Amino acid sequence: MSAIIQANPAAAPSDAAPEKELRPPSYWPFVVPALVVVIAIIIFPWVFTIWMSLNEWKVGSPTSFVGLSNYLRLTSDPRFLEAVGHTMVYTVLSVLLPLVLGTLAAVVFHQKFAGRGFLRALFIMPMMATPVAIALVWTMMFHPQLGVLNYLLSLVGIPSQLWVFHPATVIPSLVLVETWQWTPLVMLIVLGGLAAIPAEPYESAQIDGASFWQVFRFITLPLIMPFLFIAGMIRMIDAVKSFDIIFAITQGGPGSASETINIYLYSVAFTYYDLGYGSAIAVVFFLLIVALAAVMLYMRQRMLWTEIASGA
Amino acid sequence: MNPGQINLRQIIGRIGLWLAVFVIVSPAILFFLWMASLSLKFEVDNAAYPPVFIPERFAWKNYADVLASNRFLTYFVNSLIVTGSATLLALVVGVPAGYGIARMAAHKSAIVILIARITPGLSYLIPLFLMFQWLGLLGTLVPQVIIHLVVTVPIVIWIMIGYFETTPMELEEAALIDGATRWQVFRHVALPIARPGIAVAFILAVIFSWNNFVFGIVLAGRETRTLPVAVYNMISFDQLSWGPLAAAALIVTFPVLLLTVFAQRQIVAGLTAGAVKGG
């Protein structure tokens, strides 16, 4: 008896062991092909970019290791610093405007009305359409003499603008395109948030006779805050990197009035073929995006704590 | 409060709602209508002030000219090859990967996808451009197919992880107990159930690859341009003929607009899933 009892616990682990070895690794073959691709096209380029950024690397001339001097050069490159400023202005506007308009649009699309699905499809067309094709039509619409936008302004008595053809109005004009294009994404995310809100708070607010604005301010807004935050984060990442619209409409002009970091990176790397310096810009640019995301996360955390502290 | 009052309030509410819907949707609708209008007008009408919205004569020849120009067909085929190959390859490697990651619950691996999402496309271009140059691939479509994987692979993996996490495990476990291999379970149990998820991944990968512009302007030569790059090159070429330009722009983006209307449900599901998980 005792021999059998003793034998059993000994047998059990030895039975289980090969099974344990067999099962968990057996999902690996599913992942390996993708892993190879990801290493080749995402991780390898990153490692190589960092290496290049430490070298003087121009197409057609020999390369040499220069340490951090490409990074030092950035700190005193007026064109780069100017581009950082343009990127910040462009990003802040391109996050805030779609957030506000997208939230309003979501509140409307949350209502029930005939043809809602079809109208929603029309509404999201700007963000799915080919950016270059859209940029081309916006360029025509911005035309100071023949463009339809100045005609529309003249109908309401506003004088003609130079839009993307003047340094002072070029960034706001580009933000107009970006906002038109990406408000739908904010709308979709917030709409998802609205769908998740339970009906009870609204019912009790209605009984209490709350106004539409009060309901929005004190019930809807706090409940969709997490979704607004996510939308803001995604918008920030995309706005900082915005390329197609700016490149196709202004190429950073007039002069360098709309040259963002991404546009400057393009000209350094593929107009001047200064690949080492371009790589340094790419690395700093990436770190800047990560830093911005971290700041947003931190602010969100702070907001949560103050909400809890104030008992809301 | 009598019933008449409630009715009036409801009617005003309805009118307000429709007004709001109209205001919200009109920028999108008017833009695309204006795009169509530009593409169907002769130069006289496109240069008219005040602008002509619906011309007396439609310039269908704008479309005919674009379609008849000998290179347009080449660029269209290029776009089909690049988007088609990049999407199919991404599905072949990405769907199993999404399955594996979801079943292993290896959520940390998704960080790579996140990094890919944050990285500006241009940063991939610098090292890969050199690679392609060394490998002597630059005159062909291969570099563009490979670099479009940067767009399509993360989309597919991301959406498939999310999808396989929601599909039930019970059937798969039963099949394993019956002696099926992991591959058989994936092939005959998991994959059929995941078909709607694959459709979402396919549609989004196709759209974002089709629309991509930045990779093409660096990697494409005269013969290897995709449609967005071809349209961009028409701008500098044809500054003053708006009709054919707008027609070309509309032709390029028309497949995507059509897909948006007919596959709206999948697109919305894919974008919001990615978005909510992306935070």
Image (cartoon, helix red, strand yellow):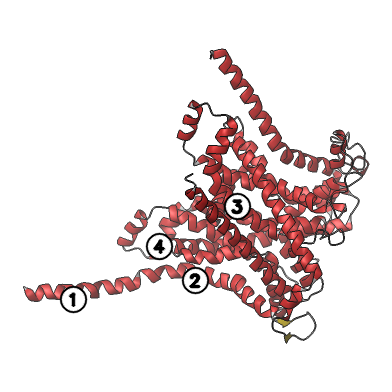
Tell which subunit mark 2 falls on: A
Q: Amino acid at mark 2?
A: Val
Q: Amino acid at mark 1?
A: Ala
N-terminal of the pair, mark 3 or mark 4, is: 4
Residues packed near mark 1 inside 10 Å, few (<14), some (14 to 19) or many (20 plus)? few
**Is residue A57 among what the camera can see?**
yes
Label 2 – label 4 distance at C-alpha? 17 Å
* Pointers 2 and 4 within a single chain: no
* Pointers 3 and 2 within a single chain: no
Residue B216 quadrant: bottom right
Per the image, the residue denoted by label 3 is B203
Please give the name of the residue rendered at 47% of the width and 49% of the height, measured from the top-left corner: A308
Label 4 – label 1 distance at C-alpha? 33 Å
Camera-side mark, 3 or 1: 1
Q: Secondary structure at mark 2?
A: helix
**Is residue B221 among what the camera can see?**
no
N-terminal of the pair, mark 1 or mark 2, is: 1
* Pointers 3 and 4 within a single chain: yes
Question: Do callouts 3 and 2 mark residues in contact (Cβ within 8 Å)?
Answer: no
Q: Amino acid at mark 3?
A: Ile
Question: Which residue is nearer to you in this view: B119 or B202?
Answer: B119
Question: Which residue is nearer to you in this view: B98 or A189?
Answer: A189
Per the image, the residue denoted by label 2 is A32
Q: Secondary structure at mark 4?
A: helix
Per the image, the residue denoted by label 1 is A10
Q: Which mark is residue B113?
A: none
* Pointers 1 and 2 within a single chain: yes
